[in-house]
Image: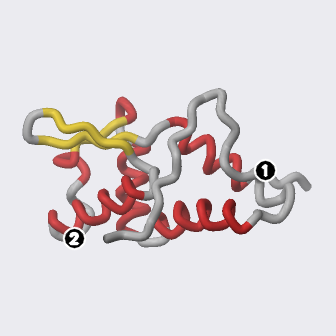
């Protein structure tokens, strides 16, 4: 049984879970939620899969289109599952294939946490 928690997908009008890193220190709870996201992206294969889905035409990708990342299909499935558990990907089964997408709110929340650095 996994002890990871999925990050909630944010609606367009919902505030992100955490403030920008430059605004104030995170609370313990905010740090746990944000760390789960970065932990999921901390693996090069997962980061590549996330990037492939995020940049795919139409905003979603069939697993059949993103499996060629230098690891076996079961390993791809494992990494996609971890990204999904972290709340970074959503999926939908269509026939025999699974389609993955990155919710726009997830990218917005990631950008919000990283914030802008002003000189």
Q: How crowded is mark 2: few (under 14 residues within 10 Å), some or many (20 or more)?
A: few
Occupied quadrant, residue 46: bottom left
Who is closer to the viewer here, 99 or 51? 99
Q: Quadrant of the N terminus?
A: bottom left
Classify residue 64 as left or right of residue 11.
left
Q: Is residue 13 above or below residue 33?
A: above
Occupied quadrant, residue 77: bottom left
Who is closer to the viewer here, 18 or 67? 18
Q: Earlier in the sequence, mark 2 or mark 1?
A: 2
Find residue 10 and report its horizontal and vertical position in percent: 56, 38
Residue named by callout 2: 71
Q: Residues within 10 Å of mark 1 (few under 14, many from 20)?
A: few
Q: In which quarter of the image is the C terminus?
A: bottom right
Point 30% across, 42% down: residue: 91
Classify residue 100 as left or right of residue 33.
left
Point 37% across, 40% down: residue: 101
> For residue 41, which numbered disc appears in the image?
none
Find residue 102 and report its horizontal and vertical position in percent: 43, 42
Classify residue 29 as left or right of residue 53.
right
> For residue 116, which numbered disc appears in the image?
1
Who is closer to the viewer here, 72 or 83? 83
Point 46% across, 55% down: residue: 6
* SS at circle 1: loop
**In whole angstroms, how far apart are the C-alphas of marks 2 and 1?**
35 Å
Q: Is residue 12 above or below residue 56?
A: above
């Amino acid at each position: 049984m996994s002890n990871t928690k999925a990050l909630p997908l944010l609606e367009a009008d919902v505030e992100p879970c955490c403030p920008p890193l430059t605004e104030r220190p995170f609370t313990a709870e905010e740090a746990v939620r944000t760390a789960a996201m970065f932990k999921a992206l901390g693996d090069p294969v997962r980061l590549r899969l996330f990037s492939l889905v995020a940049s795919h035409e139409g905003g979603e990708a069939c697993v059949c289109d993103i499996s060629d990342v230098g690891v076996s299909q079961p390993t791809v499935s494992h990494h996609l599952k971890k990204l999904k558990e972290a709340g970074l990907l959503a999926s939908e089964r269509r026939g025999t294939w699974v389609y993955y997408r990155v919710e726009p709110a997830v990218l917005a929340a990631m950008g919000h946490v990283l914030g802008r650095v002003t000189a």
